[in-house]
Image (tube, coloured by chain):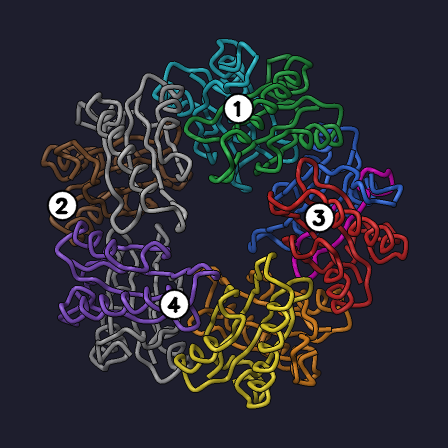
Chain colours: A blue, B red, C green, D cyan, F brown, G purple, I yellow, J orange
């Protein structure tokens, strides 16, 4: 099942640079593993913002929740979730 | 270049059924042609809503605008546009 | 899978009484069938509003979408959807 | 009487891990007791968010207020309350 | 039980004057009866607006809903409802 | 003259318990005195929230302002003010 | 007593030109009379909008309400009201 | 040229009382000088709020900006600006 | 003086095509004349929307208002206005 | 390609003056270099606000993102981005 997730990251401006760097590195490593495994199907940067638009492919809402909860940057994110389904005019086999 | 577009369709509830059917059929035909040509790269239905989330791959903002303006349902849509770019953690070759 | 849906109904104030009565009767019949089949698991009126809060139990987002699209009052509704999952502190076997 | 409550938890990101763990454990214990006693009738996690949707069954608004005020995480919550009543199309004996 | 209700009336500007007058007269008659019976405990005009703030004293949310549904102007109203309870600093015997 | 005031209190979560207790006690004492004097005519808790709905009876807007400014919790409040007047359908002698 | 009022006028685009002209002429005549009488103390156009910012000097909220209700364009206006009082740093004798 | 400015002051609740008092005294002194010079033409308190509504009379937008930037409380203000012009129904010589 | 104006056009979907075409042609003619005269200094389409972002260079707010009021599409526009001034870091001679 | 960017700067009020001054000087230097190079095509101050409206001329959304990310004040900014394209009524050669 597909979920559309928008994540906006708000790091405290007084977070030590080292802590921020470690969080981002950990986030990146997990994000790349989830992409390779097929769970994090799309990941785009929104131009100009410290935010992304993502599409997740998971068995159900529980799996989506458990996946997002593991993200190292999760405590600093604002999250918006929308469940997706096949558009009747879609011709792309993987948009479902 | 990629653009993320959310389209919400609001047909007047008093539109004759035949007119609505014709508009939707024309919209579908154009949407499928644009998908096959690679312009309309993703098209998902937002579950429960008469709305979609789409990703367009176009040379620039002018091309995006000209594409959206041709949609038969455009006069009945609310549109939100965001320019996308490559996410530094992305591993998908086509998310750019 | 569970979805939380809020439906707010806005009938045009100039809709003929007979048409409104027929729509509501059809809506009611379908709502009751879906409740008996277990798809529409909860249905509450929000006090003071022509609106309801519902919980649907469906295989996936596609099934939710197809269910909502059949509702006779759908063209007159504003819909908000949230995917639900098990709360870690829940003790109710059916809240999942 | 039934109330629909949405709780969104915002723990300060600099709260010591031990304090957060204790608050959550206390919250969980009380939530489970209130569920077993029938006061907290439904409790769902909103997928992707540190938030829940709940239904409380209490004698009146005063009892709802007193119940929520006891929650250990209350000072860190944003709360939205809606009074519910029976939906005329409801067939579920316990949705009232 | 007390409920705080804000009602904002939006009559279509093309409603025939006679129909508007009849609706308002019927609304007034019912409002005054409900006030005399003790159900509609307070009724104030918000200065400058075609809107009021009211406090209803009803057995429960169902009674509030049934009361509001009878109002002749209900189809033209935007309604906001909040359940009230006793304030711990209140000294007024009837503010509960 | 009557004013409808909604006060939402947001105490910093790191305020020492003793300071919070003192502020609340002072607030309560002043609130009760103002109620007894007839200035603070109604005071209700909004169920589930650390917020109240109040009606003040004061000579004019200046008096309202001066009254609110004295409240010990004022620096921690979000305030919304609406001027009230007699509703043409009101039958309550004191709703003016 | 002073009230700050913002009025935004939304005439239906299909209102006959003659009806619009008559409404505006009547509005203008009343607005000028109220200004000369000292009730409508200030009247400014918001640049670029069919809207104004006004300050009324009236005995109380009831008088403000009665004044606004007489405006021929009132049914087509969105109104926002704020009660004003003397600013402690004000030196203008008439800003109160 | 006239500008309508709404200023809402949000002092941090942990600002030392002495610092707050100094800022306010400086603000007051400048506000009174600007009023006497004719630049700050109107200044009203919004009843119940730590906020004001002001009208400035300045040569142009640059002068408005430079004036507001000097205010000692500016770093703690939320500011809303609207350019004003003569209302066609205005009879007050100084409302322009 | 420079003003930033955002115009969003909402033509009624049932406006006869001929009337819409005439309005747009008239709008275009005036827009081009105002651009050539230097009043309408910049005019951009917002990609994907029937909306524009414009910069006007006018003597004052009155001139801006009079200019916008003449636009044939004005009755169908939502308008947002912001006064601009020179940015202290600007190096462009004409951004003022 | 042109992008319209609104930047609102929110420096923490407790940032040391020296740090703020250095950030602003660095920001200014980069802003002026980008203007001279043609990337930052327009830069206006919004009158009364610590905010600007800018137009960037960049090859694509990636270049816009990389440019904004380098700004020393970026961590303290709220950013809104809109892609622009040629307006069909534009006569200015450089508004594209």
* The label number, if any, that marks residue B19 in the structure image: 3
The circle on residue D54 is 1
Write down the quadrant of residue F42 in the picture: top left
Asked whether A50 falls inside the magenta stretch, the response is yes
Left or right, I34 with respect to A87, comes to left
* Percent position of residue B85, x then y: 76, 59
Cα–Cα span, label 2 and label 3: 60 Å
Label 3: state its secondary structure: helix
- Name the chain letter of the residue that bears numbered label 3: B
Task: Tell me whether the residue at label 1 lies in contact with that at label 3, contact meaning CB atoms closer than 8 angstroms.
Answer: no
| SS at badge 1 | strand
Residue D40: percent from left, percent from top: 50, 17
SS type, badge 4? helix
**Would you say the residues marked 2 and 3 are in contact, meaning their CB atoms lie under 8 Å apart?**
no
| Element assignment for label 2 | loop
**What whole-number distance in Å separates the C-alpha atoms at marks 4 and 1?**
56 Å
Looking at the image, do the residues carrying marks 4 and 1 touch, with CB atoms under 8 Å apart? no
Q: Is residue C74 above or below residue I22?
A: above
Q: Nearer the viewer, residue I73 or B66?
A: I73
> How packed is label 3: few (under 14 Cα within 10 Å), some, or many (20 or more)?
few
Report if residue F56 lies within the magenta region: no
Residue topped by disc 4: G18
């Amino acid at each position: 099942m597909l979920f559309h997730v928008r994540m906006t990251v708000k790091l405290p401006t007084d977070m030590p640079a080292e802590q921020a760097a470690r969080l981002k590195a950990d986030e990146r490593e997990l994000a790349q593993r989830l992409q390779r495994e097929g769970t994090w199907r799309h990941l785009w940067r929104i131009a100009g913002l410290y935010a992304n638009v993502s599409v997740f492919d998971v068995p159900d809402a529980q799996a989506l929740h458990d996946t997002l909860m593991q993200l190292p940057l999760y405590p600093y994110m604002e999250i918006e979730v929308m469940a997706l389904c096949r558009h009747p005019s879609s011709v792309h086999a993987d948009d479902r």
